[in-house]
Amino acid sequence: MATPSSLAVFKTPLKRAYGYDENAFASKKRRSSFSALTLDVVRHDLPPRSLTPGPECAEDYKGDRFIKDPWDRGLPFRTKFSAEQFALTVNNLENQIILPPSPKTRKSHLQSGLRPFRKHLTKDLYELPPPPSATSATTNLRHYPEMTLDAPGLCDDYYARPLAWSSTDCLAVLTRYSVNYRDMNTGRIKIVCMLEIGDIGKCILWAPDTNVIGVGYDSGAVQLYNADGRMTGVVGRDAGPYVGGMSWASRNVLSVGYGDGCVRQYDTREKHATQTVEAHKSRVCGIKWSPDGSFLATGANDGSLMIWDARAARSLASDGTKEHERSMVEKKWKSRKHRSTTKAIAWCPWQPNLLATGGGAKDGFLRTWSAASATPLYEMYSHSQISSLHFAPNAKELVSTHGYRLTTGVEQSVVVRSYPKFEQTGKIFDAGHGRIIDSCLSPDGTRLVTAGADETIRVYRLFGAAKVIGKEESEMRHQSVIR
């Protein structure tokens, strides 16, 4: 039998700290907490506190401050420095409570600083964000295509413009073999022309408010066809190599940019160029007339951008100058801001003097300009090649399509940005579509068609249609204004 002395050997061993002292750690925590609390200690230079209202406010104070009455209860101050500062602002530090003002002094208190203080605290609670626009991409953009069409032979060429959408809702496509169009209302497909061996098509463009389409070739000629496939004329046979871009000034006047840097203007009823301008030192890659026909913008392969004022040329018609001695337009200004090809050019339909341009693979900048004052307005780095730009006609937004990626950005995608802040409101990325070569908007401005490197064209819904006011509604609005 074990003796008591032997049992004492089996006592519970003592806990060892093994380098960790819980008490020391707790004391550190308490010391740190206490040091934090010392920041809220009451200052000693303030007058002594009392928990009862002073005699000067006994007239307005009628209830017990511990009873939750909406107006008669008082709020005792705590010992925090912020509370004391608030008490000093309302001149009630000595009473140590905040009493509701009497009806006589309530108005003066609100005017003396309490109203802005209360408004600032409740601003986020009562202010609602502005509702999104019915035509904006924030409410109408769809990330999947409404329609995907195969286009065998579609060239993967950044400088080509193989898409054109007419005002009669006919979508034309240029391939290595032919020019076709699809009636988007009926779905009927029609072949406009077949390209001969050795002919390389570069761009196509419908004439405004007509069924005539122009086809520009690498040889410099521009052939004109109607919707039935009948050729109506040829211009620029001996103009020069390479049609870089086309833009219609009117139903019969066509401006063409060439590989030698010249811009020639044709009247489709004549065979030769009516006016010629030596615009750039390298080939023209982008050309676009403003919606009102006042300015012509041209971009070249060296990144240069020029704006031409057509109003000055019109004023020369009455000065006795001969037709062949005066230029088509007068050069408004020249700016070389892009470091590579300036192909993407877009005029704003709701602000005629606003111009947007985009740079190529070595630039990647999106810039806006004022054509009237010849000044840059905004620039943004997109990290990728910009192939086309479009202003939305029914919303203050800008659409850009992108090709190769420069660093990390919006490669092979469609991006919608707001104006003038240029905040991204929508983005469509389709990896299988490849880099986007070209794009164009539908006549109503709601859909965008893109041409990709995978030899397909895809139609996306971006914006909403503008509301058309009927006759009865317009008459009711007119009567309400009169009343």
Image (tube, rainbow, N blue to C red):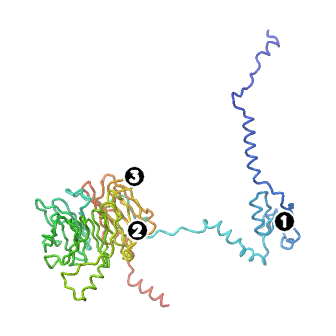
How many other residues sit within 10 Å of disc 3, few (<14), some (14-19) or many (≥20)?
Answer: few
Marker disc for residue 275 = none
Marker disc for residue 94 = 1
Compared across the picture, whether 139 is left or right of 93 comes to left
What is the x, y in percent for residue 214? 19, 70
State the SS at label 3: loop
How many other residues sit within 10 Å of disc 1, few (<14), some (14-19) or many (≥20)?
Answer: some
Compared across the picture, whether 223 is left or right of 42 comes to left
Q: CA distance from mark 1 to mark 2?
A: 59 Å
State the SS at label 1: loop
Q: Where, by quadrant of the figure, is residue 1 drawn?
A: top right
Which comes before the other along the chain, label 2 or label 3? 2
Q: Does 463 appear above or below 328? A: above
Q: CA distance from mark 2 to mark 3?
A: 23 Å
Query: What's the residue at 27%, 84% (across, down)?
Result: 314
Q: Does 358 appear above or below 454? A: below
What is the x, y in percent for residue 112? 72, 74
The residue to which callout 2 is attached is 397
Residue 188 visible here = no
The residue to which callout 3 is attached is 408
Which callout, 1 or 3, points to the residue nearer the camera?
A: 3
How many other residues sit within 10 Å of disc 2, few (<14), some (14-19) or many (≥20)?
Answer: many
Compared across the picture, whether 141 is left or right of 327 comes to right
280 vs 398, nearest the viewer: 280
Kind of residue indicated by mark 1 = Glu
375 vs 140, nearest the viewer: 375
Kind of residue indicated by mark 2 = Glu
Specify the farthest residue to the left. 197
Kind of residue indicated by mark 3 = Thr
Query: What's the residue at 81%, 57% (across, down)?
Result: 43
Specify the farthest residue to the right. 55
Q: CA distance from mark 1 to mark 3?
A: 63 Å
